[in-house]
Image (cartoon, rainbow, N blue to C red):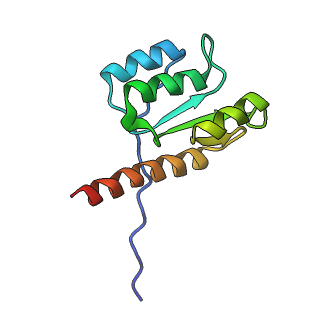
Amino acid sequence: MMTAPPRKPATYHVLSAGTAESAYEMLATEEADALLLDIHLPTMSGLALYLAIIHRWPALEGHIAIMTGDAEAEEVRTWLDHHHCTVIRKPFNLKQVADWVSLALQRDRSSDAMDA
């Protein structure tokens, strides 16, 4: 009987920012494959930051998830009706985030394969 070798866990290079402004500035110098934004940020909402990011870097659409404990709030539901974005509900665990990142990266590879 043959057994498959153990799978190595995925590793990611993670950057974090404490404010929407520093995240936006960081994206100008750092290439990102996936972004996880909180709705509640100190100076602007994560929803506004999402719109600013996809306006400047449209290729990131589909690679951004919003994390929130307020997914049922009317303003959030209305926003999500108009902007199809992954929502990761709090409380969440690392596996949920890693699974979403893996899916976002697979979509990228799939579209690259279709373009070839």
Farthest left residue in view: 116
Number of numbered discs on residues: 0
Give the image quarter of residue 67.
top right
Toward which corner of the image does residue 65 lie, by quadrant?
top right
Q: Please give the name of the residue rendered at 47% of the width and 53% of the height, measured from the top-left corner.
A: 103
Task: Tell me if 99 is positioned left or right of 77 in this view.
Answer: left
Q: Quadrant of the N terminus?
A: bottom left
Residue lying furthest top: 43
Q: Residue at x 41, y 36 (%)?
A: 60
Does 19 sit above or below residue 100?
Answer: above
From the viewer's perspective, is residue 115 above or below residue 1? above
Judged from this view, the residue extending furthest toward the right is 73
Q: Nearer the viewer, residue 2 or 80?
A: 80
Question: Which residue is pictured at 57% across the width and 41% down the height?
Answer: 85
Relative to 40, 19 lies left or right? left
Taking the image as shown, residue 100 lies to the left or right of residue 41, namely left
Where residue 48 sits in the image (x, y, percent)? 57, 21
Q: Nearer the viewer, residue 80 or 106?
A: 80
Instruction: Locate residue 113, reporting x and y percent.
Output: 27, 59
**The residue positioned farthest toward the bottom in the image shown:** 1
Q: What residue sits 65% from the left and 44% below the top?
A: 93
- Please identify the quadrant where the C terminus is shown: bottom left
- Residue 59, percent from left and from top: 37, 37
Q: Locate residue 41: give its quadrant.
A: top right
